[in-house]
């Protein structure tokens, strides 16, 4: 005996499958630089956090008011903005994360970002804020091994995510 499901149940299942497919459509891990343009006005960045996962380590920053642009790449060394001083990091490899059209402080000048995070993940050893100057916020990531990474944006709330493979 065949039973037919109501259209609403079928539609809900289709949306669920569509969402699951979209969630799996993350960018590939590569060592190539990743860039994106800002969307909207200046973004206020806060709540920088790290996470250690089974096959990758994560650095995520929350944004409000707009979506910042970014430039994420491996570099030989990370320098502080605007001083140009070397930012010492744990690990022999370094990824520079640069957010443009962004600020890591509120309109009263209160800092909204941690200066150092040391999660001790398998590959992401440390994150240090390298600058918050003239609409550019930068971080250095101390990495144990040069592996692929991916960068993507999430919404509700707006976040920029950097995953570094093990």
Image: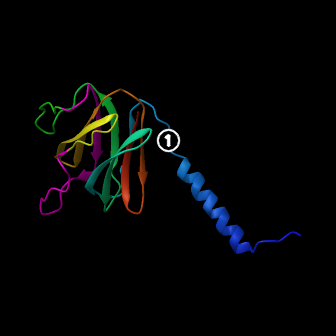
Looking at the figure, which quarter contains the N terminus? Answer: bottom right
- Span colored in magenta: 89-116
Q: Is residue 75 left or right of residue 21?
A: left
Q: Residue furthest right?
A: 1
Relative depth, front residue between 37 and 12 = 12
Where is residue 72? Give x, y as percent. Answer: 34, 37
Relative depth, front residue between 129 and 65 = 129
Where is residue 3? Give x, y as percent. Answer: 83, 71
The question of residue 106 being in magenta is answered with: yes
Q: Classify mark 1: residues with Cα within 10 Å, few (<14), some (14-19) or many (20+).
A: few
Question: Residue, x 38% and y 47% (percent of image)?
Answer: 161
The question of residue 139 being in magenta is answered with: no
SS under mark 1: loop
Where is residue 89? Give x, y as percent. Answer: 20, 32
Relative depth, front residue between 155 and 55 = 55
Question: Residue, x 27% and y 43% (percent of image)?
Answer: 119
Which residue position holds label 1?
27
Where is residue 25? Give x, y as percent. Answer: 55, 47
What is the count of numbered marks?
A: 1
Residue 70 in which image quadrant? top left
Looking at the figure, which quarter contains the C terminus? Answer: top left
Relative depth, front residue between 5 and 44 = 5
Q: Is residue 78 visible?
A: yes
């Amino acid at each position: 005996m065949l039973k037919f499901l109501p259209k609403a149940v079928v539609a809900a299942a289709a949306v669920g499958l569509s969402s699951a497919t979209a969630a799996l459509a993350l960018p590939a891990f590569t060592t190539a630089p990743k860039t994106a343009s800002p969307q909207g006005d200046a973004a206020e960045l806060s709540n920088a956090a790290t996470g250690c996962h089974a096959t990758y380590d994560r650095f995520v920053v929350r944004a409000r008011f707009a979506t910042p642009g970014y430039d994420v790449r491996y570099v030989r060394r990370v320098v502080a903005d605007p001083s140009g001083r070397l930012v010492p990091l744990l690990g022999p490899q370094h990824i520079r994360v640069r957010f443009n059209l962004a600020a890591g402080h509120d309109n009263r000048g209160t800092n909204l970002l941690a200066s150092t995070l040391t999660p001790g993940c398998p590959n992401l050893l440390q994150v240090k804020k390298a600058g918050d100057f003239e609409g550019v916020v930068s971080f250095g990531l101390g990495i144990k091994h040069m592996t692929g990474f991916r960068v993507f944006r999430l919404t509700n709330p707006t976040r920029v995510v950097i995953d570094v493979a093990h």
